Every structure is written in C-alpha cells, then in structure tokens.
Amino acid sequence: RVAYFLPRTLSGASVEALAAAAGAASVEVESNYLNNKLKAKTLYFGFDAPTPVPCFDLNDAQCADRGEALLDALERFGCAQLVAPPELRDANERARAAWTAFFGLPDAEKQRIAPGADVDGYHGVGEVGAYYNAHRSGVIFE
C-alpha cells in the first residue's frame, strides 16, 4: 500500500507509468483542491481490499494483556481503534465543554484569566513568537 502526493500537472501517461512500475493492479487518483483550485494529486496503489482496523476495548480486562498486539497494529497499520471506558469518555466531554466555553470568551476576558506568558496556559495571538502562533491563540502545556 503506497500513497504518492504529486504535482497537479501529473499526466494520465505518468499515472499509467507509475502504476506499471509499482506493479499495481489498480490505482486511485484523488484531485486535491484548495479554494476551488487544483493544487495536487494523490495516487493510491495497493488499496484494492479494505484492511480492518484493529479494535481494542479498554473496558475488557483482557485488553491489558494485549500490549504487544496494540504495538503490532500501530507498526503495521499506523492506527488502531480504542474503545474508552465511560468515565474516560465523560471526562473528555467535560474537558471539551470547558475548552469550548473558554475559547468562546472575548479575547480581553481570556487574557484577564490567562497566566503570564512565561508559564503554561493560554497565549494570545503572537504572544509566543512570530513563527509559533502569529495567526492564532492557543493553550500550551509542557
């Protein structure tokens, strides 16, 4: 399974040549647009059959013994699905609600309750450095 991110000028003949060189039975071509303009093309080789994503249910007591299987899934597929226990899902939803409420505040109010720039926490646009957050605010925890 290979995906190539290539220039938008890629011709049909080039796609055929790449597919032949890769020995692929089929190729899928995806056109990538930004602001209604073609920016690039992505070619997918070897994705003919779906690959099931391994699922690990953290509610299952036996899941604790499956560390090696999880590592194998991450190495082979680059992903795995984890089913979280209800208390973890609930804590995540509460955290999401708190952050949504905080980021919905006016900038002046966020600045008022934010810690100083030398500590973890909220930083307004451009407060961390010209390249780090020049265009957006955010929260930093290290």
Image: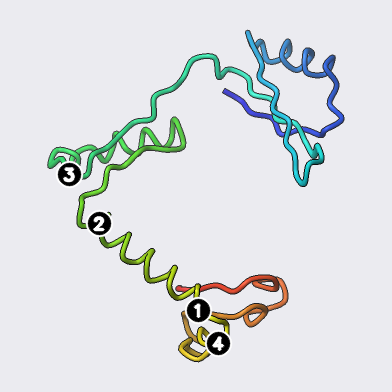
Camera-side residue of 46 and 114: 114
The relative height of residue 49 versus residue 89 in the rendered view (above or below) is above
Q: Quadrant of the C terminus?
A: bottom left
Q: Amino acid at mark 3?
A: Asn
Q: Is residue 108 left or right of residue 65?
A: right
Instruction: Give the secondary structure at mark 2.
Output: helix
Instruction: Give the secondary structure at mark 1.
Output: loop
Sequence-earlier tag: 1 or 4: 1
For label 1, the crowd category at 10 Å Cα-Cα, with few meaning under 14, some 14 to 19 and many 20 or more, is: few
Q: CA distance from mark 2 to mark 1?
A: 26 Å
x, y percentage for residue 15? 78, 18
Q: CA distance from mark 3 to mark 2?
A: 11 Å
For label 3, the crowd category at 10 Å Cα-Cα, with few meaning under 14, some 14 to 19 and many 20 or more, is: few
Mark whose residue sits in front, 3 or 1 = 1
Q: Badge 2 is on which residue? A: 88
Q: Residue 48 occupies which quadrant of the picture? A: top right
For label 2, the crowd category at 10 Å Cα-Cα, with few meaning under 14, some 14 to 19 and many 20 or more, is: few
Contact check, label 3 and label 1, Cβ < 8 Å:
no
The relative height of residue 85 versus residue 125 in the rendered view (above or below) is above
Q: Amino acid at mark 2?
A: Leu
Give the numbered dot on residue 117.
4
Instruction: Give the secondary structure at mark 3.
Output: loop
Sequence-earlier tag: 3 or 1: 3
For label 4, the crowd category at 10 Å Cα-Cα, with few meaning under 14, some 14 to 19 and many 20 or more, is: few
Q: Amino acid at mark 4?
A: Ala
The relative height of residue 141 versus residue 11 in the rendered view (above or below) is below
Give the numbered dot on residue 59.
3
Q: CA distance from mark 1 to mark 4?
A: 19 Å
Sequence-earlier tag: 3 or 2: 3
Q: Is residue 53 left or right of residue 23?
A: left
Camera-side residue of 71 and 122: 122
